[in-house]
Image (cartoon, coloured by chain):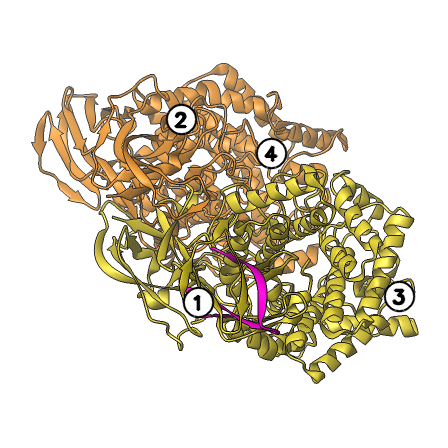
Chain colours: A yellow, B orange
């Protein structure tokens, strides 16, 4: 069902993502490799490769110098980087990089215990405590990420060394939890979706069985973590097992109807659930996934596709609580929402799932990385005020500029692996239909199934037209193409060789079947008019305000473009909003927006009885994903609207 | 300088505060006495009287049954209640209550150690650790509150038993910190202002010296608490001594220019500083007080007079950060701001200080108590949304309905003692002038100084007129009267026997001198027009919004009056706002406001491109202090304003 097949088959071409693909290859992955190897001055220490070295040494000699350093899940940073590197290698063969990856994989192999167990925290630091703290210790989480890396590396490079290692670990987990009947489920879901990938790659049923096991027992005993803590008598960081929302274990997964707790845990779990539902046809599980997805996207998601309203627990809070300045909005959580939506799109062919993928990708996820690829946001607020953001005790997490690295560095490699595998989300190839979900320029090689290649040519999201060119191996290729019609587009025209055609539109996709020769062009034209977004009046933070969207891009105002005082700015209701020409040299290429608005003057007093006076002004907006690239600066997405 | 002299001289008469005076006497104090004695079903346990009993038993017999229970500062609840009871007894002699107070005082005496030391936490639970943890353990704080109670009880009842006890404790503190040269200053300021009161009551210079000592050494060694922790090796609750903002010890007090940290600690400290500055004429200290007061009121105060923007540390955050729904806005902090402003008003005769007292009193402080006197808010948010408030992890503190009591019960008795001593703030009697700061109906007995009584007759704050009646002992009484002209009143007329008179207005006071006979009436008429309040555009939470004020009262909208959907409501810019007649049966007597506004309809979707449609509607507002008296309910102070 699409796993990893497309990364190898899709060659990114000119267009918006071309720059990102090269950035990941040339900057992000090398930069992150250095970070993992502690070679970046002034950045937080990672030590994660060194942890593997120590574990290997300890297994070889019985002892090792130094101490484990970092988060209990530090191993996963290596895994996510390897996964990203695998995708990049699929697109860009690079012997040196592959050699370095192979070296790291050998080191991982040396750090694996004889019974298949792999985890440097426990091997180096807590050898006697394996599997005693599922709540906090992330063993299954780290295993899951390394399994994902193994599958990716095998499918992208054809080398199975890491896959063998991780099958060994998966077999160990199977023995422990299935054959030996150990109790419990992971505090941080991830193993479920990873085992589903491993199953699909290896076709070993036991991996599917193991994935379903963890999904099915989760929350059946909602006090499991409490009992575990009482039994184990030690703790990594004193987490509260009574908080059953935090790790989504308050009820069996099929009974869960609100997206609660730690947002990344939630969407990783739901991704695994959706994947399992797709594989098994389990209707109850499918319904639970739909309910949870609807709850997120209708009650708990920011307009940027970000999720997680609170720093406390990095978590969902309550329906319609979406504060802009204190948002948690973790980059990893938006990525997880893309994973979840992508699986839902396989479960139920409806453009709304791809709309959310696009929303999260073009706004929250891209904002998570500096345009130059060397700095990252963990937290992506929708409003930033220097002097408060990053400083007030309620805003310590909401940094106004991207740091170089993080002590908890889950997000940067997650961005890299998503961008490097974007083809998996852009296209879905099913036996019946080729779905074009996201419009990433490039060439898809479908010679093995459709007898030809298809090239998508587009300057999306800054241009309204996408064009599909066909390159059949023989005379023609027959394609059943489904083009997503984004919900933000008031109308859409499908053209075949320049002539508008009527085609069936269902659930957000235009379906078109035809036999195409070389030179044939199918095009779709969307309506890229600037649109004003309004929030349900249940969201207190946004009453009286509007956000501006053009195509998939949410825009924001920054101080640097607006006299360094964005809080005095409002937008004129029904006022004109002009779109600049494409500015290739600004913020790596954007269209700016110029809106009719007002600048209010009000007394300098904290409170006054003087009504503000307003002057008309031009308000300049830039795409949200580019914010914070021009130094310390105010930023706001939701802007008051006035007549 | 006014300490406690006026509580005995002022008899509250008909009017707004009459109900509160009786409520404190008949409901609040008896209710709180029961709470302190653990006699209220379903309320949080207090145990604070029991702690004293146990300490007494232990001192008598060397041991005691049971365990100390409650906060390390649990003793202070008894102190604040006794202080409130003392004020009430001054107004309403009550033999039974006085007997019960005397019994408690005897118990306190029995809980005092031979060297004068008094603190049940240390006597019962940690006898070997006296004075080793100034950062957390609140010994000086509890001593301060009991000293305030002692001074109040002595001045109100003429009985000196508690004063003797607390002079013993103050002498003990003097020996320890001055004669024996112990290092350190209190983690929670309070002793400073209390020692100033004790000095003024006893005229013992050593108490002033001790107050100045604690003020002068604070923050000189800003790492004192860190060193203390290293030395002591134990902790009450693991507070971080490195956080020098929290307890206002990052710099010597004369160098402090921002109100930081725990808001109650801050304003208690500043109250002591202002009192000391007044007593000593210390100009540097005076300037520091002015700077801090300006910082609070111009950058860090809610429109309700509440202070403290964050739950984290119950603290100030940064300038212009005033979130409405997650406000901490502790009742005690608003009370402390009244204490501080009252001292500032003695330091510098300017109506702005009384304006802030009035703002805090009529809005935040009164909102801290249910209208029936039996439930209390610790936290006074300016926006409440059931489903989020009190529930989301960021809003656990912002309860939508008042609880019966608190595990940390500092606020309820603080309200009682403030309301029962309101005369001290309403009037300032100086050798030259009688200042009428707050307009509380009642009779002030100034026979000893001015040769007569003055009765203030008013239905303020629901009526615009206040009248002073004179009752000279002989033919006439000569009075230099200064009437505060509130900043919210566009204009004010002073009338003598019905005839408008010109009088000098300076810094917010109208000065009027005259010789008055029985039957003479001086009146002031204020402008009670409804006013719209706007916030500086530096405050993000309030952009595009207005708050409604009438007289000193800030109004709010509640769901119960507005179709249970206040987030769809906006106010019409320049629209009419009608004032109801006085409704004696509604919310214990209020005027409602009916404003022209709009009710917006917007898509039920979380986000939509549909512009909201707006219908004109009538928006009903009630005074903020009455909110939350009609069940679980939405509430909002800052309301979007639209043309």
Q: Earlier in the sequence, mark 1 or mark 3?
A: 3
Same chain? Circles 1 and 3: yes
Judge the density around disc 3: few (<14), some (14-19), many (≥20) Cα neighbours within 10 Å: some
Picture layout, residue B513 above or below residue A339 = above
**Side (left or right) of B162 relative to A540:** right
- Front residue of B284 and A227: A227
Say which chain tag 2 marks: B
Membership of B189 in magenta stretch = no
- Residue B170, given in percent of the width and then of the height, sits at 55, 42
| Magenta stretch holds residue A459 | yes
Determine if marks 1 and 2 fall on one subunit.
no
Element type at mark 1? loop
**In the image, which residues are magenta?**
A456-485
**Residue at 43% across, 25% down:** B629
How far apart marks 2 and 4 lie (CA) works out to 30 Å
Q: Earlier in the sequence, mark 2 or mark 4?
A: 4
Q: CA distance from mark 1 to mark 2?
A: 61 Å
Q: Identify the subunit bearing mark 3.
A: A
**Circle nearer the viewer, 2 or 4:** 2
Q: Which residue is mark 3?
A: A113
Residue B576 falls left or right of residue A533: left
Q: Which label lies toward us, 1 or 2?
A: 1
Q: Which residue is mark 2?
A: B560
- Kindly identify which residue carries mark 1: A497
Query: How packed is label 1: few (under 14 Cα within 10 Å), some, or many (20 or more)?
Result: some
Q: Which residue is mark 4?
A: B407
Which is closer to the viewer, label 2 or label 3? Answer: 3
Where disc 3 sits, the SS reads: loop
Distance from the alpha carbon under mark 2 to that under mark 3: 65 Å
Q: Is residue B34 visible?
A: yes
């Amino acid at each position: 069902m699409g796993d990893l097949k497309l990364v190898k088959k899709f060659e990114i071409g000119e267009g918006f993502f071309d720059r990102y693909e090269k950035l990941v290859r040339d900057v992000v992955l090398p930069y992150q490799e250095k970070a993992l190897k502690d070679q970046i001055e002034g950045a937080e220490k990672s030590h994660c490769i060194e942890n593997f070295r120590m574990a290997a040494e300890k297994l070889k000699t019985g002892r090792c110098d130094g101490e484990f350093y970092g988060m209990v899940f530090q191993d996963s940073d290596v895994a996510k980087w390897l996964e990203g590197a695998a995708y990049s290698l699929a697109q860009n063969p690079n012997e040196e990089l592959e050699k370095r990856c192979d070296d790291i994989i050998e080191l991982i192999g040396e750090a694996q215990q004889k019974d298949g167990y792999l985890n440097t925290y426990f091997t180096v630091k807590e050898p006697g405590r394996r599997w005693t703290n599922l709540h906090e210790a992330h063993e299954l989480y780290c295993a899951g990420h390394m399994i994902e890396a193994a599958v990716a590396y095998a499918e992208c490079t054809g080398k199975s060394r890491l896959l063998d290692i991780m099958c060994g670990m998966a077999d160990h987990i199977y023995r422990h939890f299935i054959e030996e009947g150990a109790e419990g489920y992971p505090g941080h879901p991830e193993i479920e979706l990873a085992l589903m990938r491993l199953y699909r790659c290896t076709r070993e049923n036991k991996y599917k069985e193991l994935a379903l096991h963890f999904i099915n027992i989760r929350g059946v005993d909602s006090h499991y973590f409490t009992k575990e803590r009482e039994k184990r008598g030690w703790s990594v960081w004193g987490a509260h097992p009574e908080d059953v929302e935090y790790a989504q274990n308050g009820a069996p997964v099929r009974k869960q109807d609100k997206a609660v707790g730690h947002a990344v845990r939630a969407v990783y779990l739901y991704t695994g659930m959706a994947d399992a539902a797709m594989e098994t046809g389990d209707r109850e599980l499918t319904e639970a996934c739909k309910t949870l997805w609807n709850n997120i996207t209708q009650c708990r998601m920011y307009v940027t596709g970000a999720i997680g309203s609170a720093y406390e627990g990095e978590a969902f809070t309550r329906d319609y609580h979406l504060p802009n300045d204190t948002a948690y909005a973790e980059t990893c959580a938006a990525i997880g929402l893309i994973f979840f939506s992508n699986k839902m799109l396989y479960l139920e062919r409806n453009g709304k799932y791809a709309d959310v993928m696009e929303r999260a990708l073009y706004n929250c996820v891209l904002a998570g990385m500096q345009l130059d690829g060397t700095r990252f946001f963990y937290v992506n607020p929708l409003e930033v005020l220097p002097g408060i953001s990053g400083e007030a005790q309620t805003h310590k997490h909401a940094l106004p500029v991207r740091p170089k690295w993080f002590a908890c560095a889950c997000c940067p490699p997650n961005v890299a692996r998503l961008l490097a595998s974007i083809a998996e989300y852009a296209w879905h190839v099913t036996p019946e239909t080729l779905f074009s979900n996201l419009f990433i320029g490039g060439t898809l090689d479908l010679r093995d199934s459709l007898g030809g290649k298809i090239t998508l040519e587009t300057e999306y999201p800054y241009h309204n037209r996408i064009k599909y060119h066909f390159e059949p191996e023989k005379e023609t290729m027959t394609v059943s193409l489904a083009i997503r019609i984004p919900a933000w587009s008031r109308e859409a025209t499908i053209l075949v060789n320049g002539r508008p055609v009527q085609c069936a539109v269902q659930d957000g996709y235009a379906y078109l079947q035809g036999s195409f020769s070389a030179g044939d062009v199918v095009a779709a034209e969307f309506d890229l008019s600037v649109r004003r977004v309004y929030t349900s009046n249940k969201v207190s933070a946004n009453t009286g305000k509007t956000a501006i969207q053009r195509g998939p891009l949410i825009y924001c105002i920054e101080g640097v473009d607006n006299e360094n005082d964005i809080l005095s700015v409002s937008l004129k209701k029904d006022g004109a909003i002009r779109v600049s020409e494409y500015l290739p040299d600004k913020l790596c290429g954007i269209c700016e927006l110029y809106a009719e608005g007002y600048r209010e003057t009000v007394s300098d007093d904290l409170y006054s009885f003087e009504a503000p006076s307003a002057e008309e002004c031009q308000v300049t907006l830039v795409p949200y994903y580019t914010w914070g690239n021009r130094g310390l600066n105010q930023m706001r997405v939701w802007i008051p609207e006035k007549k």
